[in-house]
Image: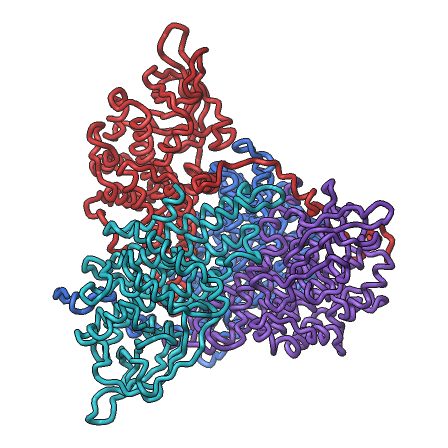
Chain colours: A cyan, B red, C blue, D purple
């Protein structure tokens, strides 16, 4: 019962996610997991691993699951993509790498799929789906303008067309290895536009600065020093970001960047059960202690509860349905809290924090704090949910 | 609350029962109109297949119906669902649907009410301490009598029929189970009942039953290995989780209404981040419980056990509802602790579900066993002293000082 | 509970009041013997200096006494302490100890009971909405009349004297404060009272007072700038924190007793780690609140404000006690939700303290201001939509798809 | 009001702690803080800092506050020592270094003061008080035998006297720089004895292995390969550890290793208040948001509540009183939870987790998890407290 519950709670509306979780877990267990602790220690991104995940033979590549098949992608449903990312988190035990994969494979590709014109789609999506081109996004820009914009867009010199972008973006996931960046810039009138900016754009500079957490994700700060970009760099409509790009970007972050954490929670829970059988306290197995049993029961429950919210929100992207910002935000709010609760429950079990092993608890504990702050954190998620409940905001 | 109440459109709604919820709580009795509304709605038949008088509703419909009734009035929901879902499932699962059709029919029609009598006075849900026993009525006859006392049982003062967990007095050579379910007619002289006033869910009656050699027909004594009963009792955990979810939804809805109306210190509550945070947390937590509840109801409607998941759900949903109700009281301020206010009732009701059925922590142990941790193992708590942590430490100057010989 | 109850040996204990606590809750009235026991114990005089009839007890003694009475019966504690501590402090602080000795003497002797009437029906503790007004009785006379309604006030149905926060109708040229405290005799015809039933602290009366041009002597109208009142009201936060601590201590003591007696599934509760964890957490949290409560009582007894610390204490202690009471219910199982059981009463009582005085979240805002964060600033909640988070996202295929033109 | 409350809540029974907190905070702010983040990154112990703290001119040295003046120590009360450590945590913003100082200055010295014979005291205490000799203790051995013993003691070969110690100890705080170690070893009959083992003892080997957290503490694993120690290495009585050394060692850990965390909590709270005034969300100062105000109010309250329990437990060591294991354990249980709550509250405020600054939140978040597991964690502390309440165990 247990292993079934923990592994497969992610019921898949279109019937295939079940095995997809397992498939991705197995793949990530083979490709990602063995070096996770070491890459974390060295703060290292391994492009070879990304290539291996992208070009997996036996199943869909992880670089472009949501890119249509006609453009070289996996053509998966949102639900199945969520399952892929859950499996990646579970088997890989590497939240930083899973974040980098999710930002590229979901945030960067879906914005081009949803808002790119045919020319943009043909140019970017096939190479993104193959993993050849990495798309990067700043996690400061996935919560609309909750934080003040740090990039401005002004029309280029008369007659030339195009735009001049200036400013800086930090917390850009994928920056050091990216081919292009999604940048949302503010006009003088306060309206905002989304751009796709190639790395080769003159004036674009990348600094090697990142947060303390998610060390296996390639981080960078992007400086835009009067970068001139053509009209065709505009994604969707000029000035339309608040109605178009931003709501989708936020919902994608809330849902799909949460998916690996469901996997991490399941891995931590399995570890904790195994550890509790091994360790002793006061001369008896930890597993005999009622309080340890309570903790483990609650951890397992948190996995199932988080799974329900996550897959509901993911499923709303399928079948032509219109996703709900409220349900996406609720999924993120719950998963972030659950990830913290599961990590802390696991850490509390005697013997959990040792000097050996791959230190998943410690890494997850550090990264979960960061995860809980991204996507806006509680201070953005709660007002968004409350706005729906109250009909204001 | 949002667009995800799948199946709710076809599920019954209970406007009259909701309107009478405060009165039901205050009088401690479920009004007759509630029973009529329940019967008319088809609620009592939803959970069962047509061969025993049910309508065989699918999982989503069952879930939506339970959620709706629990939201309308948790006390009425408990009383009706103990009888029409839990007791009827126990009879149909462990009994014989042909033989016991005579018992099931009136439960599903609403003519009779059932109670599931498990717990005794000594020690809550620990069956090792139960003493109620069924034995042959006489040397020749085929009938039985039952003796013992069950206490703190939902519906027991009002019910017509009891599904009783009892020991079997076994004759030599009987190697059947030590336990049975006895279906006992409570409208007979050798049965005494008493009511116990309780903090919440006051519409539902609660109390004890004393069997003094009460009569049970031979066909109504069903030997069951006690381990197998957990499967049937999980129906109880499931409906209690829905009771909690309904209470939490009502508390949140009241909070949203209040926040939109109330202005404090010039600020409408709805515009204050602290209130928004409480509403948002409650909403997300309720949704998490709801989704799991709907999922396991579908599992069970499809004939699968899902017992461990139901255990997890019951723990989470009942404790969550206590938190949501407490937030609602906080948002309502003094109104929320005024008797007769909806939120005051919900706060009292919520805690009942944590205890009812199996209490959370008892259930956590069962869930842990389902996780592969093995059964609970008891060892006396005697390890602190030998481990060197059983004494108060000496002071900074050690034994010398403790002996009064200052350093 | 442990050896740290410094000063408790010299503090009064209240065995009779404790023995009658269940009855006090059930009947909703404080027995006369309780008042006698209170008077005899000297409790009512502890908090005041000898010049107004007090005994000028030191901080530790005051704290130990409040803790002991709250543990004995929280309802009685509230009623007595609202009158003898809070109201008497308000009178002696803002009034004139010589002039108002006639009011203070009977409060400290227990002959009369006082109520502090602040809140009105419209919006809880927001004084901006209060309408109760004091104005001169006539053009010539020096007396005043008071008109308005105060509601959801502790002691108000039973009290003899009200300390009322009211607006002053000011004559031209009066540049005194807009507010006053009026000391109003409630035993007069133009005062009507009504009782409101409430979830917990049932021994204490609670309800409303309607003043219909009721008489107030000129000497009993004391103009006070409303900002200054917070200092006096902090006495209320302090005693409510002790109410919470006493409730939590009683709940823990009951849990320890029960855990030592009860055997479940062959395991004495006391030997189970899950129960131990609950007891230990409750103990540590109670001690944390107790130590801070004793500290601030000493500060205040020494004439220092300690207002922000008292705010922090009130928030923590009252919410902590709700948690401790909930754990006690869980440990007691069904007994803990049975009316008349000590733990059931404590669970209902505990929540009252979170709301009473200032509700926790209102108080958090005040504490935040004390931390240097400035006063609460209101801005309408209108920022989600402009920030790009106010719309549901389009689907994976963007606007094309949303327009029905499948990609 | 605020700064007074936050800084000086640590009321001192003997009247001097007030200024001592401030004195130590100032000292640590000057000596420890500037390099804290850098030493953390490099996992580095700086003996020069320890020397500076030990030999502070203007006040008591931090190496031997509890060593009697006659033996070269500070001769401080336990309450004042607690205040010193609180100030060290607050000003230094370095939980790892404060741990190392606390283990040496309290655990290692007090055991010799309380149980050492006059010869042992004269040999060790003056040089420990000056900071010349560092004493090290394994954090695995501060909870009695909650965990099974990993070191055995057998009588040395007949006629030689002394003992042979074998086994290994990990999580030894101070190991790489220690002059001697406190080692509790089990006899064949299960009874246990405490020994002081000099680093130069043949067969004693130190491995460079430490936990993920508290990176500025010098960690090591001590291997004892048949180390022969003289009779005079025994601290207190043979076989008497469970009644003598172990209860004191546990209580010292619970109380005095918690003290720096009260300081860290105060530092985090002050930072959070300052940050909330600076950062904006949705175009308004964070400090205007009701939920942020709630968080800050609760943080301040946690500091005061923790302070009360901590100083009560510390005060019980003064005036010849007999400390209470229940109160010491309650202090640790509460401080560990409060440290977590304050860290998480601070992290939740918008803008808290950036790419700049000294990253106290992230370091404290990591270290608080470890701190909460040492001293036995909840699974030891709760039964100890419950045993007192229930009169069993």
Q: Residue D198: where, in percent of width, then height?
A: 77, 60
Q: Residue at x 36, y 17 (%)?
A: B216
From where the camera sits, is residue C128 visible?
no
Identity of the residue furthest to the bottom in this view: A158
Which one is in front, D72 or B337? D72
- Image quadrant occupied by the N terminus of chain B: bottom left
Query: Is B215 above or below relative to B111?
Result: above
Which one is in front, C128 or C105? C128
Q: Quadrant of residue D63?
A: bottom right
Identity of the residue furthest to the left in this view: C405
Which one is in front, A303 or A120? A120
Q: Residue B222: where, in percent of width, then height?
A: 36, 21
Q: Residue C162: where, in percent of width, then height?
A: 51, 59
Label tally: 0
Horizontal side of A77 relative to D389 (left or right) equals: left
Q: Residue A268: where, in percent of width, then height?
A: 45, 53
From where the camera sits, is residue D285 visible?
yes
Q: Quadrant of residue A71?
A: bottom left
- Image quadrant occupied by the C terminus of chain B: bottom right
Query: Is B265 above or below relative to C266?
Result: below
Query: Is A382 above or below relative to B240?
Result: below
Q: Residue at x 41, y 18 (%)?
A: B176
Q: Quadrant of residue D3?
A: bottom right
Q: Residue at x 66, y 77 (%)?
A: D31
Horizontal side of C73 relative to D223 (left or right) equals: left
Horizontal side of D54 relative to A84 (left or right) equals: right
Q: Residue at x 69, y 47 (%)?
A: B389
């Amino acid at each position: 019962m247990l292993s079934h519950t923990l592994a497969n709670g992610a019921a898949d509306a279109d019937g295939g996610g079940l095995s997809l979780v397992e498939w991705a877990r197995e793949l990530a267990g083979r490709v990602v997991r063995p070096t996770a602790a070491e890459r974390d220690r060295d703060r290292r991104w391994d492009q070879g691993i990304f290539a291996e995940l992208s070009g997996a033979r036996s199943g869909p590549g992880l670089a472009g699951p949501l890119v249509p098949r006609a453009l070289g992608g996996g053509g998966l449903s949102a639900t199945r993509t969520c399952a892929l990312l859950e499996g990646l988190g579970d088997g890989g035990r590497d939240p930083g790498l899973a974040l980098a994969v999710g930002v590229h494979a979901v945030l960067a590709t879906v914005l081009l799929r949803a808002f790119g014109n045919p020319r943009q789609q043909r140019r970017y999506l096939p190479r993104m789906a193959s993993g050849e081109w990495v798309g990067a996004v700043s996690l400061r820009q996935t919560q609309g303008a909750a934080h003040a914009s740090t990039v401005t867009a002004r029309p280029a010199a008369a007659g030339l067309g195009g735009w001049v972008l200036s400013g800086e973006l930090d917390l850009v996931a994928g920056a050091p290895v990216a081919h292009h960046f999604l940048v949302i810039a503010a006009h003088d009138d306060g309206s905002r536009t989304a751009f796709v900016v190639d790395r080769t754009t003159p004036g674009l500079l990348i600094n090697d600065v990142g947060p303390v957490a998610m060390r296996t994700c390639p981080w960078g700060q992007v400086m835009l020093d009067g970068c001139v970009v053509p009209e065709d760099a505009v994604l969707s409509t000029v000035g339309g970001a608040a109605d178009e790009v931003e709501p989708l970007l936020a919902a994608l972050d809330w849902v799909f960047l949460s998916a690996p954490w469901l996997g991490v929670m399941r891995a931590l829970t399995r570890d904790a059960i195994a550890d509790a059988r091994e360790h002793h306290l006061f001369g008896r197995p930890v597993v005999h202690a009622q309080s340890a049993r309570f903790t483990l029961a609650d951890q397992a429950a948190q996995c199932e509860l988080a799974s329900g919210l996550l897959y509901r929100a993911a499923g709303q992207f399928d079948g032509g349905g219109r996703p709900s910002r409220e349900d996406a935000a609720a999924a993120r709010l719950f998963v972030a809290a659950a990830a913290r609760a599961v990590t802390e429950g696991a850490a509390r079990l005697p013997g959990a924090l040792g000097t050996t092993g791959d230190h998943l608890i410690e890494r997850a504990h550090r990264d979960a704090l960061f995860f809980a702050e991204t996507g806006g954190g509680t201070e953005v998620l709660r007002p968004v949910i409350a706005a729906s409940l109250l009909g204001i905001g | 609350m949002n667009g995800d109440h799948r199946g709710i459109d076809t599920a019954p709604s209970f406007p009259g029962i909701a309107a009478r919820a405060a009165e039901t709580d205050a009088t401690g009795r479920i009004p007759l109109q509630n029973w009529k509304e329940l019967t008319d709605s088809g609620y009592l038949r939803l959970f069962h297949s047509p061969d025993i008088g049910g309508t065989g509703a699918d999982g989503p419909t069952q879930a939506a119906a339970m959620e709706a009734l629990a939201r309308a009035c948790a006390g009425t929901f408990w009383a009706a669902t103990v009888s029409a879902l839990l007791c009827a499932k126990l009879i149909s699962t462990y009994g014989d649907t042909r033989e016991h059709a005579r018992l099931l029919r009136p439960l599903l029609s609403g003519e009779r009410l059932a109670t599931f009598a498990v717990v005794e006075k000594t020690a809550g849900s620990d069956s090792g301490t139960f003493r109620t026993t069924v034995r042959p009525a006489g040397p020749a006859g085929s009938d039985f009598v039952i003796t013992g006392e069950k206490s703190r049982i939902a519906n027991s003062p009002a019910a017509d029929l009891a599904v009783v967990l009892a020991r079997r007095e076994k004759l030599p050579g009987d190697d059947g189970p030590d336990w049975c379910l006895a279906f006992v007619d409570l409208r007979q002289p050798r049965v005494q009942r008493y009511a116990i006033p309780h903090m919440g869910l006051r519409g539902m009656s609660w109390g004890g039953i004393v069997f003094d050699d009460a009569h049970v027909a031979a066909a109504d004594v069903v030997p069951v290995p006690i381990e197998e009963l957990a499967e049937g009792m999980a129906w109880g955990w499931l409906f209690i989780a829905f009771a909690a979810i309904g209470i939490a939804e009502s508390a949140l809805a009241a909070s949203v209404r209040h926040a939109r109306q109330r202005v404090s210190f010039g600020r409408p509550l709805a515009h204050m981040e602290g209130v928004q945070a409480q509403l948002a947390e409650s909403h997300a937590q309720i949704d998490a419980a709801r989704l799991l509840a709907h999922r396991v109801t579908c599992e069970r409607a499809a004939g699968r056990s899902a017992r461990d998941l139901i255990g997890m759900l019951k723990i989470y949903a009942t404790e969550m509802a206590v938190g949501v109700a407490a937030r609602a009281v906080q948002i309502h301020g003094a109104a929320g602790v005024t008797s007769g206010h909806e939120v005051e009732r919900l706060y009292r009701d919520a805690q009942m579900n944590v205890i009812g059925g199996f209490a959370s922590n008892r259930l956590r142990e069962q869930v842990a066993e389902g996780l592969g941790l093995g059964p609970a193992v008891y060892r006396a708590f005697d390890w602190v002293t030998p481990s060197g942590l059983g004494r108060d430490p000496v002071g900074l100057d050690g034994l010398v000082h403790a002996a009064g010989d200052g350093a």
